């Protein structure tokens, strides 16, 4: 569990570069070019943050590597329909380990979480059906992340899971200032279909057997993006159902009799694909 105080996860790796003793006439030039020792440190800091719209207070979480220097890209992480929880924060920390500043967003307000699918459906439906409210809440998180001292304001992207994937796809379709959006086990039939406002690069990774994502909606989604010559990729993992990235999905599926199931292989592959997606957007992060 992540408490209310800032957390520090420190991982240190020592890389030693040893070279054979050079001959006398080579020693000067080799000493200049060779590093005797290089220390690579990862110091992930988590910050509890509060932000608001004119009607709602929200609780977020920002993670970044404190050992890094200079501004870097920011990534918004939008939660599943269960709400802003430890899983969302874990993904933010994983992005921080990759070199980004990541913010786990609160789209429900007050850090509210659903304990039952009926509440999750009610909370997520309220957001998706109230466009003005959804935009204000998303923009409030965007502005907070963009103005973080470690973030390059010109380089912001978003990832989302389930409900969160639909949120970021909808925001991108509406012209949100995002370089890229990556959605996991997400519906693609959102209130605002892809149109001329779309400028972000898109990655969607779903389970091919996810009953919440119809073939018709995927076909319509792809056709709309193709008509725009949009930069996108849609991946469907065979035999995989909904919520495949969440280790708690299988237990929740059994508890509530829902087609939810964790798939370790698809989870690993989709995270690797996300890294590739972000590397193409921000190659400087791994330089």
Image (cartoon, rainbow, N blue to C red):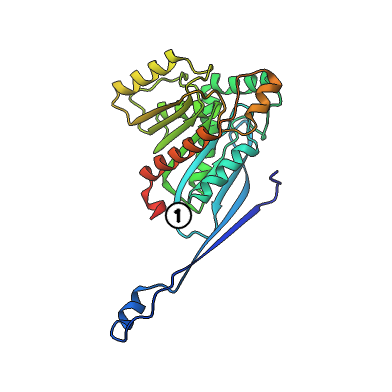
**Residue 151, position as x, y percentages in the image:** 47, 50
What's the residue at 63%, 28% (across, down)? 249
How far across and down, in percent of the image, does residue 65 sit?
54, 55
> Would residue 199 appear left or right of 75 to someone viewing this image?
left
Q: Can residue 249 be seen in this snapshot?
A: yes
How far across and how far down the image is residue 40, in percent? 50, 62
Q: Nearer the viewer, residue 278 or 30?
A: 30
In the image, what residue occupies the spot 66% across and 52% down? 6
Residue 118, quarter of the rendered image? top right
Expressed as whole percent of the image width and height from the top left, the position of residue 116 reads 70, 22
- Name the residue tied to disc 1: 71
Up the image or down, 187 lies above or below 159; here it is: above
Query: Is residue 51 something one can see in this rendering?
Result: no
Helix, strand or loop at mark 1: loop
Q: Which of 235 and 107 is in front in this view?
A: 235
Question: Above or below — where is 226 with respect to 46?
Answer: above
Residue at left 41%, top 52%? Answer: 285
Task: Judge whether 70 appears above or below 155 on screen.
Answer: below
Picture mark count: 1
Q: Is 112 displayed left or right of 104 in the figure?
A: right
On-image quarter of the N terminus: top right
Corner quadrant of residue 201: top left
Pick the residue in front: 149 or 181.
181
Quarter of image, res 232: top left
Left or right placement of residue 66 versus residue 238 in this view: right
Farthest residue, direction top: 216
Q: In which quarter of the image is the C terminus?
A: bottom left
- Structural crowding at the residue carrying mark 1, measured as other residues with C-alpha within 10 Å and reported as few (<14), some (14–19) or many (≥20): some
């Amino acid at each position: 569990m992540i408490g209310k105080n800032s957390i520090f996860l420190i991982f240190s790796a020592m890389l030693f570069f040893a070279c054979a003793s050079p001959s006398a006439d080579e020693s000067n030039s080799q000493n200049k070019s060779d590093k005797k020792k290089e220390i690579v440190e990862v110091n992930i800091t988590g910050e509890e943050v509060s932000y608001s719209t004119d009607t709602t207070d929200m609780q977020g979480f920002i993670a970044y590597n404190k050992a890094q220097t200079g501004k870097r890209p920011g990534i918004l992480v939008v939660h599943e329909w269960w709400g802003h929880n430890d899983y969302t924060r874990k993904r933010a920390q994983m992005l921080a380990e990759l070199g980004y500043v990541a913010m786990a967003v609160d789209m429900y307000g007050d850090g509210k979480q659903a304990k039952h699918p009926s509440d999750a459906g009610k909370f997520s439906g309220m957001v998706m059906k109230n466009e003005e409210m959804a935009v204000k809440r998303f923009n409030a998180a965007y502005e907070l992340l963009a103005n973080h001292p470690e973030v390059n304001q010109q380089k912001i992207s978003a990832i989302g899971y389930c409900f969160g994937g639909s949120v970021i796809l909808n925001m991108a379709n509406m012209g949100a200032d995002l370089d890229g959006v990556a959605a996991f086990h997400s519906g693609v039939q959102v209130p605002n279909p892809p149109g001329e406002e779309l400028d972000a690069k898109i990655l969607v990774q779903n389970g091919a057997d996810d009953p919440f994502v119809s073939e018709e909606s995927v076909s319509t989604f792809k056709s709309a993006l193709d008509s725009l010559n949009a930069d996108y990729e849609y991946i469907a993992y065979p035999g995989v159902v909904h919520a495949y990235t969440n280790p708690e999905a299988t237990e929740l599926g059994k508890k509530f009799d829902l087609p939810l199931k964790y798939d370790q292989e698809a989870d690993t592959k989709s995270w690797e694909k996300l890294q590739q997606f972000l590397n193409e957007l921000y190659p400087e992060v791994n330089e």
